[in-house]
């Protein structure tokens, strides 16, 4: 079916101050998108109608160079902006590629929903919800979330100050940490010249100094910990230093409300003459 095109004509009108004055060109109305071969006067408007209204678009002729017409889309086409401020509601449903600095800072809800979202560039990418919530992959569908999957980069999640926390849930599937064996967990250390310390963390390192547990004797170490409960699951290790043949070995770990005790037995041939190190991790601590 041939496209119906309303041709451009040069309009003139009689004026008062001069014999004739220019009249704006009537738009071209067509069922086709303009091409580089569709030449007209600069500034001519082309209205494309697809017959349904859903795909309609508007073009304007910006220049004709070497018999090639350059039409710019004013509707659903692409655009380049040096600066863009959107104060209302915007919906991005197609492929979105943003290079450079991308800053989403809003007290309301920010939703970016598209086939592909590419936040690339040498600049910074900041997503700040202020008083709101940042949700990534929260829909109840099967999907993958990839962050920093290529290249050499550092990924920081969460603020390093304040009381904010990070919760990572994997549902019913397994959570894999593929780090080539390089996984670091920060622990808090406390050292005491006795058999008791206070460490209110779920990952801690207790150092006990000045003890002289004899060979075949046992020593009970008390770690006061507000995160511990009577049913806590605790991973615990014990090691000792010193020149003597003292071999401190864990024989019992008893969790309680607000503390837990670790019993160590010296299975060596000589008395303890070095520091005892107990490292623990309360797996189910309510942090």
Image (cartoon, rainbow, N blue to C red):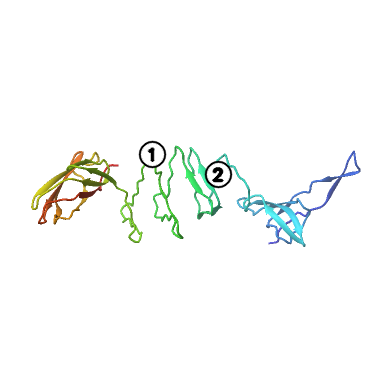
Residue sitting farthest toward the right: 19
The quarter of the rendered structure image containing the C terminus is top left
Q: Nearer the viewer, residue 202 or 32?
A: 202
**For numbered disc 2, what is the local secondary structure?**
loop
At 22% from the left and 46% from the top, the residue drawn is 207
Observer able to see residue 224? no
Distance from disc 1 to disc 2, alpha carbons, whole Å, reads: 33 Å
**Neighbour class for label 1 at 10 Å: few (<14), some, many (≥20)?**
few
Residue 87 location, quadrant: top right
Q: Nearer the viewer, mark 1 or mark 2?
A: 1
Name the side, left or right, on which 37 lies relative to 53. Answer: right
Name the side, left or right, on which 267 lies relative to 276. Answer: left
- Residue 172 at x, y percent in the picture: 30, 53
Question: In the rendered image, which residue does mark 1 sit on?
Answer: 162
**Neighbour class for label 2 at 10 Å: few (<14), some, many (≥20)?**
few
Question: In the rendered image, which residue does mark 2 sit on?
Answer: 90
Name the side, left or right, on which 270 lies relative to 7. Answer: left
At 43% from the left and 54% from the top, the residue drawn is 154
Q: Are marks 1 and 2 in contact (CB under 8 Å)?
A: no
At 43% from the left and 48% from the top, the residue drawn is 136
- Residue 252 at x, y percent in the picture: 13, 49
Q: Nearer the viewer, residue 153 or 222?
A: 222
Q: Earlier in the sequence, mark 1 or mark 2?
A: 2
- Residue 155 at x, y percent in the picture: 42, 52
Residue sitting farthest toward the front: 243
**For numbered disc 1, what is the local secondary structure?**
loop
Q: Nearer the viewer, residue 278 or 15?
A: 278
Observer able to see residue 263? yes
């Amino acid at each position: 079916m041939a496209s119906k095109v309303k041709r451009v004509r040069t309009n003139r009108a009689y004026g008062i101050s001069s014999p004739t004055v220019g009249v704006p060109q009537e738009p071209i109305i067509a069922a086709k998108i303009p091409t580089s071969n569709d030449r007209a006067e600069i500034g001519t408007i082309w209205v494309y109608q697809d017959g349904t209204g859903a795909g309609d678009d508007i073009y304007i002729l910006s220049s004709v160079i070497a018999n090639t017409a350059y039409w710019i889309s004013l509707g659903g086409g692409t655009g380049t902006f040096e600066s863009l401020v959107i104060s209302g509601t915007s919906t991005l449903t197609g492929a979105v590629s943003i290079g450079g600095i991308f800053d989403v800072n809003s007290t309301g809800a920010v939703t970016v929903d598209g086939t592909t979202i590419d936040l690339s560039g040498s600049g910074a990418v900041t997503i700040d919800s202020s008083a709101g919530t940042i949700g990534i992959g929260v829909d109840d569908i099967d999907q993958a979330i990839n962050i920093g999957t290529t290249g050499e980069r550092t990924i920081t999640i969460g603020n390093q100050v304040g009381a904010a926390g990070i919760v990572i849930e994997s549902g019913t599937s397994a959570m894999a940490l593929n780090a080539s064996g390089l996984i670091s967990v920060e622990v808090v250390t406390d050292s005491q010249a006795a058999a008791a310390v206070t460490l209110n963390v779920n990952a801690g390192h207790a150092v006990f100094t000045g003890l002289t547990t004899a060979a075949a004797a046992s020593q009970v170490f008390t770690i006061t910990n507000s995160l511990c409960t009577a049913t806590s699951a605790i991973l615990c290790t014990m090691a000792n230093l010193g020149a003597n043949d003292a071999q401190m070995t864990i024989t019992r770990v008893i969790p309680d409300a607000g503390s837990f005790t670790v019993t160590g037995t010296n299975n060596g041939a000589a008395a303890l003459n070095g520091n005892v190190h107990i490292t623990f991790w309360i797996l189910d601590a309510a942090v």
